[in-house]
Image: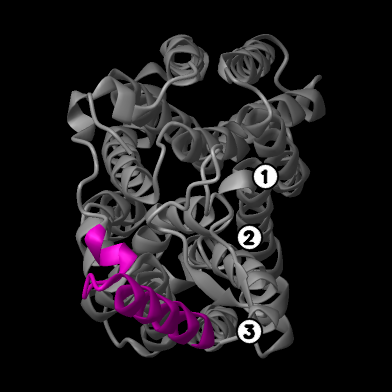
Amino acid sequence: MSEEETTTLDRPAADRAGTPLPHATAQPTWLGPVLIVGIVLAALNLRPAITSLGALFEETRTGLGMSGTVAGLITSVPALCFAVFGVTAPRLSRRFGPVAVVCAGMAAVAAGLLIRPFASGAAGFLAASALSLAGIALTNVLLPVIVKRYFPDRVGTMTGLYSMALAAGTSLAAAATVPLTEALGGSWRTGLLIWACLAVAAVLLWLPITRAARRADRAQAAATGSGASAAVRADAGPRVVRSRTAWALACYFGLQATGAYITMGWLPQIFRDAGVSASTAGVLLAVTMVMGVPLAFVIPGLAGRMRNQGAIAVTLGVFGLTGYLGLSFAPAAGAWAWALLLGVSNCAFPLVITMIGLRAKSPAGVVRLSAFAQSTGYLISIPGPLVIGTLYQHSGGWDLPLALMAGLLVPQIALGVLAGRDRTIEDECGMRD
């Protein structure tokens, strides 16, 4: 393959002294632009499986004859699947390479979305949903790894790009599922099925990306005489459980996810109990979610240019505290302002994803850190919405739940400051690149 036909995407192919690094690989010239599109398309598929179901949940419950217990189980399954299946990502990445695993993850998302509308009972529906969520979990963990490996000098920009796509997919599925369902005949099965088209498109794009990445890995293995691809050889990552920064990132991830799930699940009810109409309450939630689209691009780019990201974590936390304070004292009068403030606060997700890419030196370190932080974080987030619902039911109002929601932001801010310090898990664990 000639120089005119190839380009190196692993930009740090040489260190500052000009010495080639062992993970540098030559890639086809078309792979860079196509990989960018593939990352965006994969990110668009990371939430529609969840938010499209939320939009048609009542119709789905009725159509499948779900009990209240089963319905409650389905609402808690996403975070559980993200935690359980995310743990497997490092092993699969070492065995097959992160690109191939993301392609397989997109295939699992597509298969689950294609199967579940045809389920005749709750068990089949739950199993198909779990298949999609398993694919989402793997992709959640490995997209930061692919960004670190192929765009190491643009971690902030690329993280912002796919975070923005993730937020757009979330909002699009929440807002468009019901109108599309009505336009296509009104069946909840059709309304859920249409999102499989987006996942199938992602699979079709990731197939050639996977083939190109595999050929490049084989060429590198042949050139170095290692007999294994870089992805497989990169097994000597740090033991992240020994890193304070890794634990800070995991707990920060868990608390921000807790706040996001609580907001998505309960914010409309808070407004409705304050006298806001149901339709307006839905629009307010959409406003909160849409805020994540532009900010999900801006925040990672800003974070990537800073040596310490703690100031951003503090700023986002203060926005959240102000929003919860406003909901406590004037929920209806300042509804639009509180929705905007909480939308800004929920952009802690793109921040923590960016920090995961910055707190490790190598793709091997990123895959371990990403799996640990996300799996641990999603486990932490599981009880949040349930606890808030219990407090609301037993206290008869929102004063106590809102106090807890605001209180959780205090340790979240502190953890964000710790996670944002300019250090890497390799340094903390005494490992070398």
Q: Earlier in the sequence, mark 3 or mark 1?
A: 3
> Is residue 337 left or right of 390 when viewed as pictured?
right
Q: Position of residue 314 (x, y in %)?
A: 60, 13
Q: Tell me which amino acid carries mark 1.
A: Met
| Among the 4 quarters of the image, the one containing residue 305 | top right
Q: Position of residue 410 (x, y in %)?
A: 47, 9
Q: Which residue is mark 1?
A: 289
Q: Is residue 25 above or below residue 384?
A: below
Q: Residues within 10 Å of mark 3 (few under 14, many from 20)?
A: few
Does the rendering let one see residue 43?
Answer: yes
Secondary element at tag 2: helix
Marking on residue 186: 3
Q: Closest to the observer: 278 or 167?
A: 167
Q: Is residue 231 magenta?
A: yes
Q: Earlier in the sequence, mark 3 or mark 2?
A: 2
Q: What distance separates the C-alpha of mark 3 from that of mark 2?
A: 16 Å
The mark closer to the camera, 3 or 2, is 2
Pointer 2 with pointer 1, Cβ within 8 A: yes
- Magenta stretch bounds: 208-233
The residue drawn where x is 47% and y is 67% is 25
Q: Is residue 238 above or below residue 123?
A: above
| Magenta portion: prevailing SS class | helix
The residue drawn where x is 27% and y is 40% is 372
Q: What distance separates the C-alpha of mark 2 from that of mark 1?
A: 9 Å
Q: Earlier in the sequence, mark 2 or mark 1?
A: 2
Q: Which residue is mark 2?
A: 174
Q: Closest to the observer: 166 or 362?
A: 362
Q: Tell me which amino acid carries mark 3.
A: Gly
> Is residue 103 left or right of 343 when viewed as pictured?
left
Q: Quadrant of the N terminus?
A: bottom right
